[in-house]
Image: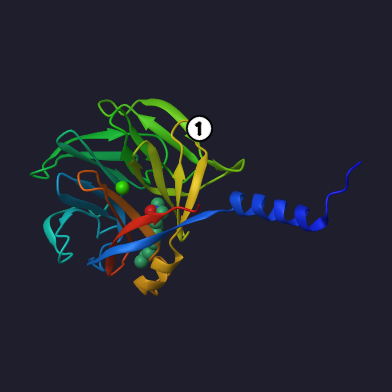
Amino acid sequence: MRRFRPIFLALFFSALLSRAFAQDTYRIVHTYPHDPESFTQGLVFVDGHLYESTGLNGRSSLRMDDLETGHALQKLDIDPKYFAEGLTNWGSTLVQLTWKANTAFVYDRFSFRQLKTFHYDGEGWGLTQDGHSLILSDGTATLRFLNPETFAVRRRITVSDHGIPVKELNELEYIHGEIYANIWFQKRIARISPATGKVLSWIDLSGLVADAGVTDENAVLNGIAYDAQHDRLFVTGKLWPKLYEIKIVKQP
Ligand code: DDQ
Ligand code: CA
């Protein structure tokens, strides 16, 4: 039997390992101001406008942010009994979750007039949509696909990385057939296959977290929005003074 030289074996396994643990990185395209009072729970970019859902009881809001100044161009304060969470657009509406009240609010996107409410089981964390279903995270490793007209559950996926469930999925964004997700208290974003729930890669944003220069322990990376018209990806964090447009740099 032919013997393999140890050096080749070592090279082979290190190549295998570096693929298995490959992390994508990023490049900053532009840095914008972000309201450091915004406890960002949801971020979405629609038709040239950036919308944000902010949390905490008594500080929850729905707002349209001015990208250049970070100021709210339009703002709706939410009843202090609610802790607002994920946000997405559907048709001419915006849909906003609440953390533990099992309630979602549907607003007219232009006037912020509340049109209706939906109820769902479990907690509400992140929300996005794929053009067919709303996609909801609830703090577990499961994502639910919901009928946007009724909030009925169409299907579920469990998000996993090499067979290990990825819990505490937070803010979401559907981009070119993939789900991008913040993970609570992690400095990286997962790219997830909506078909299988498998993590396709991780984007390491620890450098951005450092650049944001936040000290509050709750000021975690959270908030992903995609401008499909101009292929711009925006990310920020809770109580961050900055919002970044980034490009993903894929591992070869
Ligand atoms: N969740 O968005 C991950 C679902 C919940 C975040 C809860 C953070 C509570 C922070 C309380 C801080 C008080 C200043
Ligand atoms: Ca989002």
Q: Work out which residue is located at the far right of the displayed protein and give it.
A: 1
88 displayed left or right of 217: left
120 displayed left or right of 4: left
Label total for image? 1
Q: Is residue 163 above or below residue 25?
A: above
Figure colour scheme = rainbow
Residue plotted at (92% across, 41% down): 1
Residue 196 picture location, percent across and down:
50, 32
Residue plotted at (31% across, 66% down): 239
Q: Is residue 152 above or below residue 102?
A: above
Residue plotted at (36% across, 48% down): 99
Q: Nearer the viewer, residue 168 or 121?
A: 168
Q: Is residue 82 visible?
A: no
Q: Is residue 192 above or below residue 34?
A: above
Q: Quadrant of residue 65?
A: bottom left
Residue position marked by numbered label 1 in the rendering: 196
Q: Is residue 177 visible?
A: yes
Residue 237 picture location, percent across and down:
34, 62
Name the element at disc 1.
loop
Q: Quadrant of residue 222?
A: bottom left
230 displayed left or right of 222: left
Q: Work out which residue is located at the far left of the displayed protein and give it.
A: 111
**Mark 1, residues whose alpha carbon is within 10 Å: few (<14), some, or many (≥20)?**
few
Residue 60 picture location, percent across and down:
25, 56
Q: Nearer the viewer, residue 46 or 169?
A: 46
Residue 235 picture location, percent across and down:
32, 57
141 displayed left or right of 138: right
Report the amino acid beneath label 1.
Thr
